[in-house]
Amino acid sequence: MTARRTFVIVGAGLAGAKAAENLRQEGFEGRLVLIGDEPERPYERPPLSKDYLRGESAEKPYVHAESFYSDNEIELWTSTRVSGIKASLRELWLEGDQRLSYDRLLVATGAVPRRLNVPGAELGGIHYLRTVADSQRIGERIDQGQRLVVVGSGWIGAEVAASARQKGCQVTMIEKGSLPLEHVLGPELGEIYVDLHRRHGVEFLPETTVERFEGQGSVERVLTRDDSSIETEFVVVGIGVAPRAGLIETAGIQVSNGVLVDEHLEANAPGVFAAGDVANARHPFYGRHLRVEHWANALKQGPVAAAAMLGKPAIYDEIPYFFSDQYEASMEYHGYATEWDEVVFRGDIAAHEFVAFWLKDQRLVAGLNMNVWDAGEPIRELIRSRRAVDLRDLADPAVVLSELAEAEPAMAEMDALSAWASEGGAL
Ligand SMILES: Cc1cc2nc3c(=O)[nH]c(=O)nc-3n(C[C@H](O)[C@H](O)[C@H](O)COP(=O)(O)OP(=O)(O)OC[C@H]3O[C@@H](n4cnc5c(N)ncnc54)[C@H](O)[C@@H]3O)c2cc1C
């Protein structure tokens, strides 16, 4: 008779919950423990800067119904922090020194907001947004229509600014670069987003940073590097996140910008896997490690990790995908582009109904569809095909994208493709 095996998942977020679900679906009958340090059962974070923040959905965005965990014999330990792991002993311990041995371990600890360390940073009214509790605290301020300064105009900052404006707050957004979201989307899309926010009444202050916060107990004003003083009642800082891998650093598991895992999401230590925001996974399509901080990545890596933990030949090679909703502009982005030669548009930019294509060496490396909902699949196919595309076809709404993706490459393109592939073919 074989002993009952124990699989432990550290981190009860989306990746952890989906892994647990899939372990049962894939037939794992052993002991399954899902450990999270938040008081809530696993929930999804995207609504926390959107409808949930605005109080439009009273329900917390849980991943599963409450009964799901007991129905599936998943031991869900909430409000429980794992404080150490010893990979060589296949053991972890919790605060209070309780020990737990595992046969397989999934690290799904997510990410943590980067802190702004300036004088006054400890004042009340300065918020970060990661958890449902953070969202509730910020939501209370937004409900009162208070004045808000948002520091950082990445995804969190931009979405919070939009939600706050929608609820009638006066919003100032401070950005150390020139445009919102420019670090991911580049200047072409950054211009569209700055225009969107300004038209909705956000005061956007580019190329400046916070020098200090001032106030009596709670923040009352923000002083910037260029000597502006902005009166405010609360602040939301959204300056990016860092992988929550501190726990792992002393565990004997390789960490480099997150937990370093292969395409099966397996780490260098026996029986250890990682998924979601914390995983820096080797991506077969890009031929390099990639750490992705997006909902779809957590959703889809969880099941792959589950299969791999059971010894199945699962590989994670999804084209990165994320979405964002700001005011009337909802969009999806597919791909991964750190450099490109040009951005081609099709559709109506002013009406926020368009598709943008990022091209490198005439090949599609990323695409964004705003308020256009049939472009995702062909964009991903075109990226995967690595075929040269005619820019006029991309820009022309009369050319059906899916047909472009399916078209047979011409002979000249075939030659170019095989030459490119033989040179290494990765980004
Ligand atoms: C406000 C907000 C809005 C977002 N909007 C979008 C969006 O519109 N589109 C998009 O694509 N993505 C969005 N994201 C990103 C997306 O939500 C994340 O990529 C996703 O939540 C990652 O899931 P995860 O399971 O890897 O990590 P998490 O959801 O962070 O879960 C990890 C869990 O592990 C717990 N944990 C960590 N360390 C320990 C420990 N030592 N012991 C026990 N528990 C531990 C954490 O507390 C947490 O509960 C948003 C994120 C936020 C915060």
Image (tube, grey):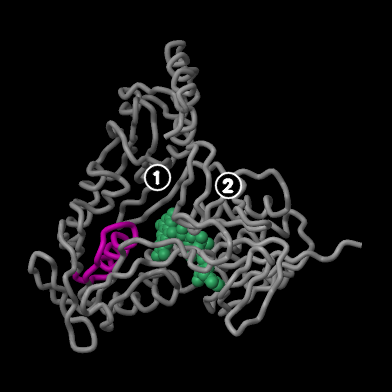
Q: Residue at x 59, y 50 (%)?
A: 265
The mark total stands at 2
Which x, y percent locates residue 177?
20, 54
**Mark 2 sits near ligand 1, with its Cβ under 8 Å away:** no
Q: Nearer the viewer, residue 146 or 351?
A: 146
Q: State left or right for residue 154 relative to residue 203.
A: right
Q: State left or right for residue 112 relative to residue 231.
A: right
Kindly indicate whether the residue at mark 1 contacts the one at mark 2 (C-beta within 8 angstroms). Answer: no
Magenta segment, which residues?
149-170
Of callouts 2 and 1, the N-terminal one = 2
- Residue 333 numbered mark, or none: 1
Q: Residue at x 66, y 60 (%)?
A: 21
* Amino acid under disc 2: Asp
- Residue 262 numbered mark, or none: 2
User: Split into 4 quadrants, where in the image is the N terminus?
Assistant: bottom right
**131 over 283 or under it: above or below:** below
